[in-house]
Amino acid sequence: MHAAQDTLNLTPPQPPGMVRALGLALLAHALLLVALVINVQWKQTESATVEAELWSSSIQMAAPKAVDEPPPPPVETPRPTPPPPPVAKVQPPPPAPDVKDADIALERAKKKREAEKLEQAQQDKADKAEKAKRDKIDKDKALKAQKAEEAADKKADEDKRLKDKKAAQDKQDALDKKAQATQDAKNAAKAAAEKASAQADAKDLAAQRADNLKRMAGMAGATGGANATGSALQSSAPSSGYGGRVSAKVKPNIVSTDTFDGNPAAEVEVRSASNGTILSHKLVKSSGNKAWDDAVLKAIDKTETMPRDTDGRVPSPMILTFRPKD
């Protein structure tokens, strides 16, 4: 107990104001801490974010805004005390760049951007015009090719139409020729049929006429048998010498200076009245020589009458045959 008391008595006395100096040091540190906190919060709340769209090849960073340095905390003048322990110094922020230079940089960047936009717009316009020109050329080429193709198709269609028309015309001509040949054959067959029909009609007419004469003769009291073929009331066959008498009367009237090959015969039907006057005559069979036929007919016209037979009658009708050499 006494030893501890002696030790205290030997310790040098404490300098006066130690507690106050310690309090002031703590207060200064607290004020510094508060200033730092306020400075950090002020930068976070009031600092404005600057956005700039740069069109330059190099990136430039904007300078920070100027920050007002906070006023130093009031410091009480200490009483003469021992010097306080060293306090850490606060590094002041760098000076803020000049706002005018930043505006100039932004203005330059804006003008450069606008110039680049204008240049890009002009380039786009030129590209658009070039594209429109190429499109027009391509369109003209396509239109020209289309017109050429249409002209070729039209020519091909026209050629085909002409070819088809010619083929149809040739076919029609062939049909017309065939039809004409068929018509000619029909006409020839028709003419032959008409001729045959005329001949048949003539034959039927002659037969009908003969039948009529026979019927008329029968109705007038003809004396022929059932199979008689004459048309007179009674049989009137000329006598054996009657032909010579007719020939002797007609032949002197035949006048012909022509010479004849062979001895052609001309047969003439003569119809006479009961007194022998010749009523009509016609050539039944030609001799083949018109001159001889005409000479015989003229001779009969000159004769005018036929001689009577031995019974005093004149046969009618009679078929007389005349030959130039008889």
Image: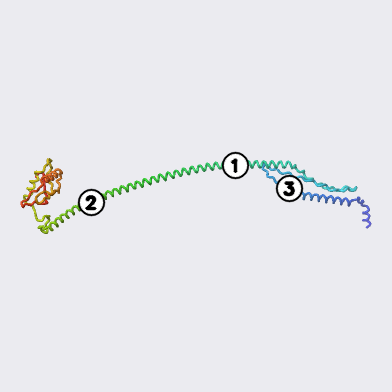
Left or right: 23 as drawn, with respect to 262: right
Is label 3 in a helix, a strand or a loop?
Answer: loop
Along the line of sight, the residue nearer the viewer: 193 or 133:
193
Instruction: Please tell me whether mark 1 or mark 2 is closer to you in this view.
Output: 2
Along the line of sight, the residue nearer the viewer: 122 or 289:
289
Image coordinates of residue 278 in percent, x first then y, are: 11, 48
Task: Work out whether residue 57 can be spotted.
Answer: no
Q: Amino acid at mark 2?
A: Glu
Q: Amino acid at mark 1?
A: Lys
Q: Counting other residues with Cα less than 10 Å from the Cα at mark 2, is it few (<14), some (14-19), or many (20 or more)?
A: few
Does residue 258 lie above or below 208 as drawn? above
Image coordinates of residue 257 in percent, x first then y, are: 12, 40
For the residues marked 1 and 2, what is the alpha-carbon distance in whole angstroms?
98 Å
- Give the residue pinned by disc 3: 48
The residue sitting at 59% across, 42% down in the picture is 125
Task: Work out whether residue 114 can be spotted.
Answer: yes
Marked residue nearer the N-terminal end (1 or 2) = 1
Q: Counting other residues with Cα less than 10 Å from the Cα at mark 3, is it few (<14), some (14-19), or many (20 or more)?
A: few
Q: Counting other residues with Cα less than 10 Å from the Cα at mark 1, is it few (<14), some (14-19), or many (20 or more)?
A: few
Instruction: Please tell me whether mark 3 or mark 2 is closer to you in this view.
Output: 2
Is label 2 in a helix, a strand or a loop?
Answer: helix
Along the line of sight, the residue nearer the viewer: 297 or 33:
297
Image coordinates of residue 137 in percent, x first then y, are: 52, 41
- Give the residue pinned by disc 2: 194
